[in-house]
Image: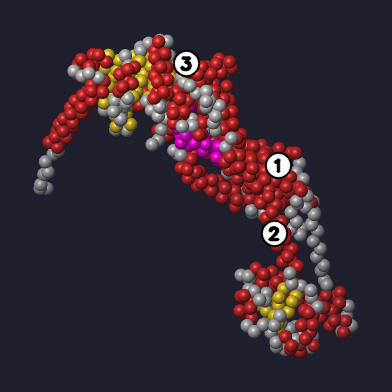
């Protein structure tokens, strides 16, 4: 359902995503983990056609992000960390607007809105204007907005941030249901407990590259750790040391390459 | 097209729920502007009347030596004579408006039928003194004529021999044309002003506001193309600005009809023909479309509402200043080239139309040039919206 091939994204001289490739299938929750600045959000933004890749490409449900971006967006639901809503609109109106933009209308749209209000437990505030919502309420509406069109591929970037335990459980249950329905859920998070509970496979990103990609059990075995947090710290730590060594070597070479100063005419 | 309409309707509803847009696009043109304009005009009229009725305060040097002059001036209702010590100080402080300094042998010269000089000392930097100067000059002119008539009668001559020419000024401007001229000083400028101000807040709200609220990313994640999103937003801005123009035109027209200006130029009637209203509305709407595209292009560069206002202020001044200057020039005859300058061209056509001059070349050049500028503005806005660097600038 999602195929990423040699994806690279540069911002001027900075490489945010460096030759990333992976594949994820329907009926699984795929974890995209990494520290801040690892390139997760940029990778997601390129897959969602918000940013264009410098090289490489990706396919969503068979649609290429470069050749068929509108079809990619029609089949993809992305929850970003930006959970802004239209303050002068109610939660329901926010959802209705986005539903219409995804080509839904009439009874089908209203049924879908009501269903999401129920699933995400938003009845209490569905018809109130979003301007005075708490972060948790906003997060729920943003989640509903991202899946209003019932997409086949769902990418959630920190979906439980700002939610209390009960609300977080609602979102986790939704992800499990989506997986059971055969959808692909890509979960990008810092919350290793949730990741360990939910993800079938994980990819760990660091400095724009994928440094580990496998089933959780395989990763635990390779790193000789007991849980995802330990494995994550070990992988990132090792990669950090190797990156620091590489940087030192590069600087040494740079210095020794400098021509010696010549005196005379 | 359905998606464009969805974006358009959402933006219109959103702006109707926004007090800032309602104030600048609806309340200001309907209530505030006519109130300010009519209020300031009535105040001006009152000031002119007051100044005309107010007597000039005059001091005369060595007054007792010039009984003929003093007797004449005392009979004038528009002159009050006052005795002072230091005329310069009195003029400075406003204690007197005019200081008269007749020649020392004034009375003798008058009796001898010879010209007698009177120096009228005023302070032109003081408006009251300058206005009193005109009044006193006119009164002394009457004094001169009275003395001349007496002299001729004593010499047995008919005083009429002095009147060789009697110029009579006849104004053929109809009350409607006078009304059009007055409207031409203000209305065009307000139409241009509302073409910008009417769309300003909604333009910021749908672009920089969308970034500030962090809803832009969710919007461009939908399968709707960026061109359609821009078109929907653009239509909303243009509709709001056009509504603002229509409302301002209607309310100012109604206000002027109810309270016609009176600057002492006889009867003034405000009565526009449907043709002139149609031309003004047509040009006004195209003007609003052009400014909407430009406003959207400028506002999308900003990350926040506040930043957008900083970008739009110089743009606003640049657009309004030439318009304000040309709108106030009553006798300026523009060449054909002036009718391709956006904003200024609309002002000239409005001014012509208001005094019932329908010049097809001027109207056509203005319409076509504004349409070309509008198309360029829309293309520029949609190009800018396609650039990821501008949309996701940190």
Q: Nearer the viewer, residue B272 or B296?
A: B296
Residue A149, position as x, y percentages in the image: 49, 17
Please tell me how crowded label 2 is: few (under 14), some (14-19), or many (20+) other residues with Cα within 10 Å.
some
Residue B242 lies in quadrant: top right
- B215 drawn magenta: yes
Residue pointed to by mark 3: A150
**Residues packed near mark 1 inside 10 Å, few (<14), some (14 to 19) or many (20 plus):** some
The chain to which mark 2 is attached is: B
Cα–Cα gap, marks 2 and 1: 23 Å
Task: Please give the residue where the numbered disc 1 appears in the rendered image.
Answer: B250
Describe the element under mark 1 as helix, strand or loop: helix
Front residue of this view, candidates B384 and A70: A70
Residue assigned mark 2 = B44
Q: Is residue B302 above or below residue A167?
A: below
Res B28 quadrant in image = top right
Vertical side of A91 occupied by B341: above or below: below
Residue B369 visible at all: no
Which portion, as a residue range, is magenta? B199-219
Q: Residues within 10 Å of mark 3 (few under 14, many from 20)?
A: some
Q: Position of residue A94 (x, y in %)?
A: 52, 26
């Amino acid at each position: 359902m999602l195929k990423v091939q040699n994806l690279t994204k540069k911002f001027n001289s900075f490489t945010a995503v460096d030759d990333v490739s992976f594949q994820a299938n329907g009926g699984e929750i795929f974890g995209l983990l990494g520290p801040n600045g690892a390139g997760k959000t940029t990778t997601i933004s390129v897959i969602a056609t918000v940013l264009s890749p410098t090289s490489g490409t990706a396919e969503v449900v068979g649609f290429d992000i470069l050749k068929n971006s509108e079809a990619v967006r029609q089949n993809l639901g992305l929850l970003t960390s930006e959970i802004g809503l239209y303050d002068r609109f109610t939660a329901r109106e926010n959802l209705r607007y986005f539903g219409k933009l995804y080509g839904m209308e009439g009874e089908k749209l209203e049924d879908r809105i009501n269903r999401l209000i129920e699933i995400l437990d938003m009845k209490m505030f569905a018809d109130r204007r979003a301007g005075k919502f708490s972060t948790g309420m906003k997060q729920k509406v943003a989640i509903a907005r991202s899946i209003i069109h019932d997409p086949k591929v769902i990418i959630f970037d920190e979906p439980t941030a700002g939610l209390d335990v009960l609300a977080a459980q609602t979102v986790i249950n939704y992800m499990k249901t989506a997986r059971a329905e055969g959808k692909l859920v890509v979960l990008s998070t810092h919350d290793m407990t949730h990741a360990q509970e939910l993800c079938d496979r994980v990819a760990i990103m660091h400095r724009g590259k994928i440094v580990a990609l496998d089933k959780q059990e395989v990763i635990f075995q390779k790193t000789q750790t007991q849980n995802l947090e330990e494995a994550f710290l070990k992988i990132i730590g090792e990669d950090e040391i190797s990156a620091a060594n590489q940087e030192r070597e590069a600087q040494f070479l740079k210095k020794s390459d400098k021509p010696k100063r010549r005196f005379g005419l | 097209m359905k998606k464009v309409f969805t974006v358009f309707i959402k933006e219109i509803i959103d702006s109707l729920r926004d007090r800032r847009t309602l104030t600048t696009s609806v309340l200001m043109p309907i209530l505030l502007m006519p109130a300010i304009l009519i209020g300031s005009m009535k105040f001006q009229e009152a000031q002119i009347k007051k100044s005309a009725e107010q007597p000039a305060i005059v001091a005369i040097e060595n007054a007792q030596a010039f009984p003929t002059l003093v007797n004449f001036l005392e009979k004038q209702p528009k002159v009050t004579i006052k005795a002072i010590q230091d005329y310069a100080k009195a003029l400075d402080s406003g204690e007197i408006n005019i200081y008269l300094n007749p020649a020392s042998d004034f009375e003798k010269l008058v009796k001898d039928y010879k010209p007698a000089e009177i120096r009228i000392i005023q302070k032109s930097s003081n408006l009251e003194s300058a206005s009193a100067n005109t009044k006193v000059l006119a009164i002394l002119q009457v004094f001169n004529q009275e003395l001349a008539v007496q002299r001729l009668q004593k010499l047995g001559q008919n005083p009429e021999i002095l009147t060789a020419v009697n110029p009579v000024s006849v104004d053929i401007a109809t009350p409607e044309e006078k009304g059009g001229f007055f409207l031409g000083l203000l209305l065009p400028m307000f139409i241009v002003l509302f073409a910008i101000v009417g769309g300003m807040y909604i333009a910021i709200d749908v672009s920089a506001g969308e970034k500030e609220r962090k809803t832009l990313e969710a919007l461009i994640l939908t399968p709707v193309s960026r061109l359609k999103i821009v078109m929907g937003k653009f239509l909303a801005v243009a509709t709001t600005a056009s509504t603002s123009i229509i409302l301002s035109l209607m309310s100012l027209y109604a206000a002027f009809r109810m309270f016609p200006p009176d600057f002492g130029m006889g009867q003034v009637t405000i009565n526009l023909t449907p043709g002139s209203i149609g031309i003004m509305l047509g040009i006004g709407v195209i003007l609003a479309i052009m400014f909407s595209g430009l406003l959207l292009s400028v506002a999308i560069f900003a990350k926040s509402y506040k930043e957008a206002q900083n970008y739009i202020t110089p743009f606003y001044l640049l657009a309004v200043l030439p318009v304000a200057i040309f709108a106030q020039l009553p006798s300026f005859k523009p060449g054909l080239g002036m009718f391709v300058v956006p904003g200024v061209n609309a002002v000239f056509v409005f001014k012509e139309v208001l005094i019932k001059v329908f010049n097809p070349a001027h109207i056509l050049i203005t319409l076509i040039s504004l349409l070309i500028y509008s198309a360029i503005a829309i293309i520029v806005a949609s190009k800018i919206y396609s650039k990821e660097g501008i949309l996701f600038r940190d």
